[in-house]
Image: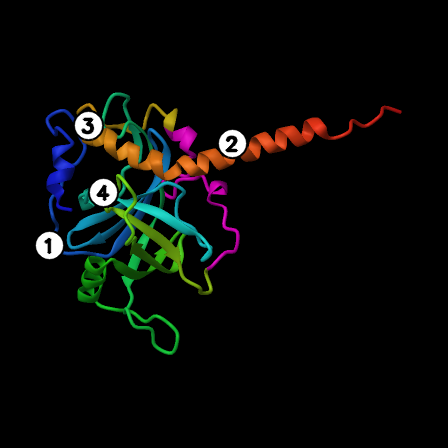
Amino acid sequence: MPLEEYKRKRRFDETPEPAGKVETKSTHRFVVQKHDATRLHYDFRLEMEGVLKSWAVPKGPSLDPADKRLAMQVEDHPVSYFDFEGNIPEGNYGAGTVMVWDLGTWQPLSPVPVEGKYVPGTEAEAVAMLAKGDLKFRLHGKKLNGDFAIVKMKGRRPGSKGNEWLLIKKHDDFEVEGYDIDQYDESVLTKRSLSEIAGDSGSKEWTSRPATGRGKLKAAWLANAVAKLDKKRAEEKKAEKDSKKLAPKKKRT
């Protein structure tokens, strides 16, 4: 997705948000931005081909190989978007609080493992793997490390735009069984929590154009992606509440 889609959604005469450009060199950085918008999600971005290739991950990345995280591919973002942290005012596209949850560098991996292990690949291999829909890479971050793959889903659900991928952790020394992303709510840049950033008047604010129909559609993707999760959590909370009601009360002595 070119930067034209990113620019179409924003009016740069009204916002300090970077217009950006396609860079001539790629330094293979990555960033994960925690974004409390219409629904809380994580934006996973890989610097590649002069832009940030971007996916919205409703449940966030995981270090547990058993987790297959849904990742909705969104428009490419400019590299200058890399370290944004702050609040996007209500009524604007993407309104909400943004945290730089993790950052570092990434390394493309060869699509063919050697003796059962993935070895460093080339930029050309990475471009080809992304186009094919199966990109393997290694992260060197503050929170995320080790080998990952992001794989495009082949089966399209009714109403799907064909932008559904899965972000998967590979088995290696950095895997964490039962990984709980919720326990890590701190910016790697400022050490602030999401709530602290939200209430910090010193945070940078963007003023962008009101959300268009296409912007709302993006929120709908996330809503559909996490609907089942929300329902499951509600059922679990109800079951827990009901069990407490049925539990025999302890007699006072």
Quadrant for the C terminus in the image: top right
Residue on which disc 2 sits: 234
Number of numbered tags placed on the structure image: 4
- Amino acid type at circle 4 is Lys
Which residue is pictured at 78% across the width and 26% down the height? 249
Q: Position of residue 12 (x, y in %)?
A: 12, 30
Instruction: Specify how the rendered protein is coloured.
Output: rainbow
Between residue 138 and residue 72, name the one nearer to us. Answer: 72
User: What residue occupies the far bottom of the structure in this picture?
Assistant: 115
Q: Which mark is first along the chain, 1 or 4?
A: 1
Residue at 77 percent across and 29 percent down: it is 248
Q: CA distance from mark 4 to mark 3?
A: 15 Å
Q: Amino acid at mark 2?
A: Ala
Residue 99 visible in the picture: no
Q: Does 138 appear above or below 8?
A: below
Instruction: Identify the residue under disc 4.
Output: 161
Q: Magenta span covers which residues?
A: 175-197
Q: Amino acid at mark 1?
A: Thr
- At horizontal 30% and vertical 58% (from top left) the residue drawn is 106
- The disc at residue 24 is 1
Structural distance between the alpha carbons of marks 3 and 1: 32 Å
Q: Find numbered disc 4 in the image and state the secondary structure of the residue it sits on.
A: loop
Q: Are marks 1 and 2 in contact (CB under 8 Å)?
A: no
The nearer-to-camera label among 3 and 1 is 3
**Which mark sits nearer the N-terminus, 3 or 1?**
1
CA gap, disc 4 and disc 1: 30 Å
Position in image of residue 187 (x %, y %): 39, 40
- Residue at mark 3: 213
What is the C-alpha distance between the residues marked 2 and 4?
28 Å
Q: Earlier in the sequence, mark 3 or mark 2?
A: 3
SS for tag 1?
loop
